[in-house]
Image (tube, helix red, strand yellow):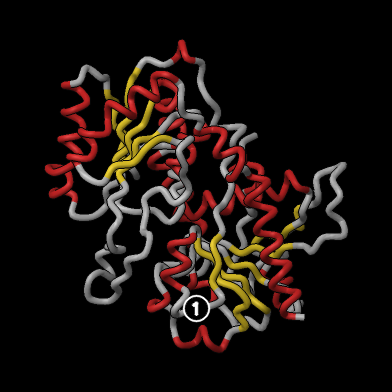
């Protein structure tokens, strides 16, 4: 049974109608009984037409379109729960009745901020990592809540938040390294997986970057497979990584970059577009937010993972060096993930953040 099946919470209705969610027990043989039980809350969508329809819409979509796409926000919940399972740390998921009966306990709200509007939260709160894209989006009413800590996925994102919220910290969720594993060398049939996650001003970057990179690779005699963010299922991506010897990752900037880290865990070295410059989300830049301080598309990355470039010229000048090292097996991307981003490491760090928040509260 995969992580998604093992940790899928039983759907609950709005707080005043929901049943108590079950407590996920500690794994047999693990010593988690003396640890704080985490109260996790994750909602990917709010009700749209009638109370509770947020549970029905994904089911209808799945019936019509097949297996649903796992969003980055849901992946955070699934991987966190999987890591907690391995550590034997107990948790509840979306038990609104319990948390209302126990206002002294910490509520860990991972998902979208509309959950804060469903009732008057009296608990100390740990918010994030999938809450607000920027503090300017937070309502004034947030100041009335007992927010102990706000989490975002990486250091540069935390630095951007900190002038507004000094109680912000960085936390990356772990990668399921037992699932994202290297394929045998003889199974590799494609030189490069071109991962296209360009989100904004696509027409410009298709002409200036995406197509020039693809054409350059093909002109160099490299076989190329293209996959585009939001247009694939996880199984398709996993199969592509098993076929490909390397990956070119194209994204303006990332707060964590789970897909890139799944490639690293799979032993696939990455040549990443890391243009730097300001945070350029068009919802905010340039009129609402101007931040330039270590913005990156690969915030978790070192020399074991691969190399980076800043533009099409940088790609052309750096490609041969990257390919030479990748072909020689000089990179060790999976080692980086095993050292820094396993399910257990991510879950333990989250638990320690939650525990520290309650110690400060006490």
Q: Is residue 68 visible?
A: no
Within the image, what quadrant is residue 319 found in? top left
Q: Quadrant of the C terminus?
A: bottom right
Q: Residue at x 52, y 52 (%)?
A: 74
Image x and y of residue 129, in percent: 52, 62
Judge whether 125 appears above or below 265 on screen.
below
Q: Residues within 10 Å of mark 1 (few under 14, many from 20)?
A: some
Q: Nearer the viewer, residue 322 or 101?
A: 322
Q: Nearer the viewer, residue 217 or 126?
A: 217
Q: How many marks?
A: 1
Position in image of residue 347 (x %, y %): 66, 52
Q: Which is nearer the eye, 305 or 181?
A: 305
The relative height of residue 19 versus residue 359 in the rendered view (above or below) is above
- Looking at the image, residue 294 sits to the left or right of residue 314; the answer is right
Q: Residue at x 39, y 76 (%)?
A: 137
Q: On the rendered image, what quadrant is the N terminus found in?
A: top right
Which residue is depicted at the point 58% across and 32% down?
A: 179
Q: In the figure, 206 relative to 284: above or below?
A: above
Residue picked out by circle 1: 165
Q: Position of residue 80 (x, y in %)?
A: 62, 51
Question: Is residue 252 at all visible to an observer of this figure?
Answer: yes
Q: Give the side of residue 344 with respect to residue 34, left or right.
A: left
Residue visible at 13% across and 49% down in the picture:
204
Observer-nearest of 153 and 121: 153
Q: Quadrant of residue 127?
A: bottom right
Residue found at the very far top of the displayed protein? 186
Identify the element where label 1 is drawn.
loop
How far across and how far down the image is residue 84, in percent?
71, 50
């Amino acid at each position: 049974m995969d992580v998604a099946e093992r940790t899928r919470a039983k759907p609950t209705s709005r707080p005043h109608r929901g049943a108590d969610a079950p407590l996920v027990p500690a794994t047999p043989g693990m010593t988690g009984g003396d640890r704080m039980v985490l109260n996790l809350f994750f909602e990917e969508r709010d009700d749209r037409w009638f109370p509770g329809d947020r549970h029905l819409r994904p089911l209808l979509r799945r019936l019509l379109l097949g297996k649903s796409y796992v969003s980055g926000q849901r992946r955070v919940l699934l991987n966190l729960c999987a890591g907690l399972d391995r550590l034997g740390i107990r948790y509840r998921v979306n038990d609104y009745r319990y948390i209302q009966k126990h206002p002294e306990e910490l509520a860990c709200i991972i998902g979208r901020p509309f959950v804060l509007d469903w009732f008057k939260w009296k608990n100390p709160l740990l918010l994030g990592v999938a809450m607000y894209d920027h503090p300017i989006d937070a309502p004034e009413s947030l100041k009335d809540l007992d927010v102990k800590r706000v989490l975002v996925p990486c250091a540069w994102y935390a630095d951007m938040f900190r002038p507004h919220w000094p109680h912000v910290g960085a936390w990356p969720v772990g990668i399921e390294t037992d699932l994202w594993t290297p394929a045998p060398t003889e199974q590799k049939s494609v030189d490069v997986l071109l991962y296209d996650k360009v989100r904004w001003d696509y027409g410009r970057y298709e002409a200036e970057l995406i197509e020039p990179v693809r054409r350059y690779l093909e002109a160099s005699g490299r076989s190329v497979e293209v996959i585009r963010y939001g247009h694939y299922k996880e199984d398709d991506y996993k199969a592509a990584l098993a076929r490909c010897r390397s990956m070119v990752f194209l994204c303006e900037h990332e707060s964590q970059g789970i897909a890139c880290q799944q490639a690293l865990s799979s032993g696939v070295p990455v040549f990443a577009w890391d243009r730097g410059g300001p945070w350029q989300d068009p919802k905010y830049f340039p009129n609402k937010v101007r931040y330039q301080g270590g913005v990156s598309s690969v915030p978790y990355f070192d020399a074991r993972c691969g190399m980076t470039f800043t533009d099409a010229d940088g790609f052309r000048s750096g490609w041969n060096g990257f390919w030479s090292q990748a072909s020689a097996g000089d990179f060790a991307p999976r080692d980086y993930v095993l050292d820094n981003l396993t399910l257990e490491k991510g879950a333990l760090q989250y638990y320690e953040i939650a525990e520290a928040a309650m110690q400060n509260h006490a």
